[in-house]
Image (cartoon, rainbow, N blue to C red):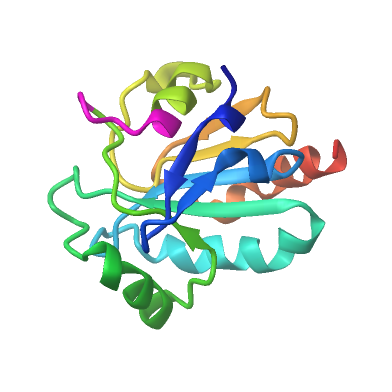
Amino acid sequence: MSLYDLSFNDTAGNIIPMQQFQNRVLLLVNTATKCGLAPQFVDLEKLHQEYKDKGLTVIGFPCNQFAGQEPESNETVVNVCQINYGVTFLLSEKIDVNGKNTHPVFIFLKEHANSGILGDAIKWNFTKFLVSADGLTINRYAPTTNPMDIKKDIELFLQKI
């Protein structure tokens, strides 16, 4: 099984097959609008705008598993992200990233990421996964890692497309 065999639902409930992102670099992030790290949405959007035409796709996966910091519904989360942070990149419906209901995309990411000392469990909102265009290399970044600090890694992955 590969990441491209999986799918997720967008905030409107449409099925989005991961296969459509094959041969693109992916930046996948579990997000929460009420988190103290939510200002990272701004830098995620900057990366999206700078690299979307060069092969990067940014996708946010709203999650309410950490201190109830994603109170928005699937219907309202897009508007809140757009109004408060200017987000135009794709958002999934709310998902779980840990526990028995962990979304299959995050099961795959946690099992295949170069996570070093981070371990498997997602510790907090804004854990980032950078996936190479062939889907074989997955780098994991801590919630406190500023999205702009992984720009060099994004550029390295984009060079290999």
Q: Is residue 9 left or right of residue 1?
A: left
Q: Quadrant of residue 160?
A: top right
Which residue is most to the bottom?
Answer: 83
Q: Return the residue nearer the eye: 22 or 122.
A: 22
> Is the stretch drawn in magenta largely helix, strand or loop?
loop
Number of marks: 0
Name the residue located 53 percent from the left edge and 23 percent from the top edge: 113
86 is higher (above) or lower (below) than 53 = below
Magenta segment includes 87: no
Which quadrant would the N terminus be assigned to in this image?
A: top right
Which residue is most to the left?
Answer: 67
Q: Position of residue 47 (x, y in %)?
A: 63, 61
Q: Is residue 5 left or right of residue 80?
A: right
Which quadrant would the C terminus be assigned to in this image?
A: top right
Q: Is residue 124 left or right of residue 84?
A: left
144 is higher (above) or lower (below) than 112 = below
Q: Quadrant of residue 33?
A: bottom left
Name the residue located 70 percent from the left edge and 34 percent from the top edge: 132
Magenta segment includes 105: yes
Name the residue located 51 percent from the left edge and 32 percent from the top edge: 6
Name the residue located 20 percent from the left edge and 49 percent from the top edge: 64
139 is higher (above) or lower (below) than 8 = above
Q: Position of residue 89 (x, y in %)?
A: 54, 64
Magenta extent: 99-106
